[in-house]
Amino acid sequence: MTERTFSIIKPDATRRNLTGKINAVIEDAGLRIVAQRRIRMSKAQAEKFYEVHKERPFYGELVDFMTSAPVVVQVLEGPNAVAKYREVMGATNPAQAADGTIRKLYAESVGENSVHGSDSLENAGIEIAQFFKDDEIVG
Ligand code: GDP
C-alpha cells in the first residue's frame, strides 16, 4: 500500500552538511520526497513533538538538541513507507544499526542519531499535520 511517513533530518546531520547524502539514501531506497522544508525548530515545537518522551531522563537533552541547529522536515511517500523508512534509518543506537542504514552510516550517538521517522501510520499522519499543510505535499 502506498503510504506517507514523516521524516526529520536532525541537527547533527544538517551541521555536517549531510542533507544531500541522507536524501540519496532515502531516494535509493525507493522513497519519494514529496515535501521538504528546512526550519529552526522552536522549543515549543520540539517539546510537543517529543511529548511521549516527557518522563524520560533524556527529554530535556533531546529538546535542547533538536533546537540547537536547523532541521529538515520531510514527507516521504512509497510502498509501505512507514516500515520501509524505519528499515532505512536503522536502530535508534547507531552501534546496533545494520550496515547501509542512515544511522550506521552517519549517526554520532543514540541521542544525536541523524534522522527521525514515524513509528506507525497513525503517528505519521499526526506528525505530518504538525509541520505541513496538505497543499505543500506534492505527490
Ligand atoms: P526512534 O524512534 O528510533 O527515534 O527512537 P525513540 O522513539 O526511542 O527515541 C526518540 C529519540 O530520542 C531518539 O531518536 C533519540 O534522538 C532520542 N533518544 C532515545 N534514547 C536516548 C538516550 O538514551 N539518550 C539521549 N540523549 N537521547 C535518546
Image (spheres, grey):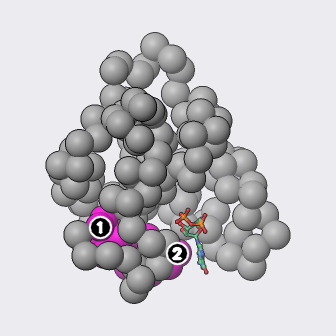
Q: Residue furthest front?
A: 1
How far from the left and from the top, in percent, is residue 126? 64, 36
Quarter of the figure with the C terminus: top left
Does residue 131 belong to the magenta stretch? no
Amino acid carrying label 2: it is Gly
- Magenta segment, which residues? 101-113
Residue drawn at 54 percent across, 60 percent down: 66
Residue 52, quarter of the rendered image: bottom right
Residue drawn at 76 percent across, 73 percent down: 56
Depth order, front residue of 94/16: 94
Can residue 131 be seen here? The reply is no
Amino acid carrying label 1: it is Thr
Q: Which residue is mark 1?
A: 101
How far from the left and from the top, in percent, is residue 70? 43, 52
Q: Nearer the viewer, mark 1 or mark 2?
A: 1
Can residue 59 be seen here? The reply is yes
Work out how far the residue at label 1 is from the one at label 2, CA to CA, in angstroms: 16 Å
Q: Left of 103 or right of it: where is 18?
A: left
How far from the left and from the top, in percent, is residue 61? 64, 73
Q: Cβ of disc 2 within 8 Å of ligand 1? A: yes
Q: Residue furthest bottom?
A: 95
Depth order, front residue of 61/52: 52
Quarter of the figure with the N terminus: top left
How far from the left and from the top, in percent, is residue 25? 22, 55
Q: Earlier in the sequence, mark 1 or mark 2?
A: 1
Q: Left of 104 or right of it: where is 59?
A: right
Q: Residue 111 has which mark? A: 2
Q: Is residue 62 above or below residue 79?
A: below
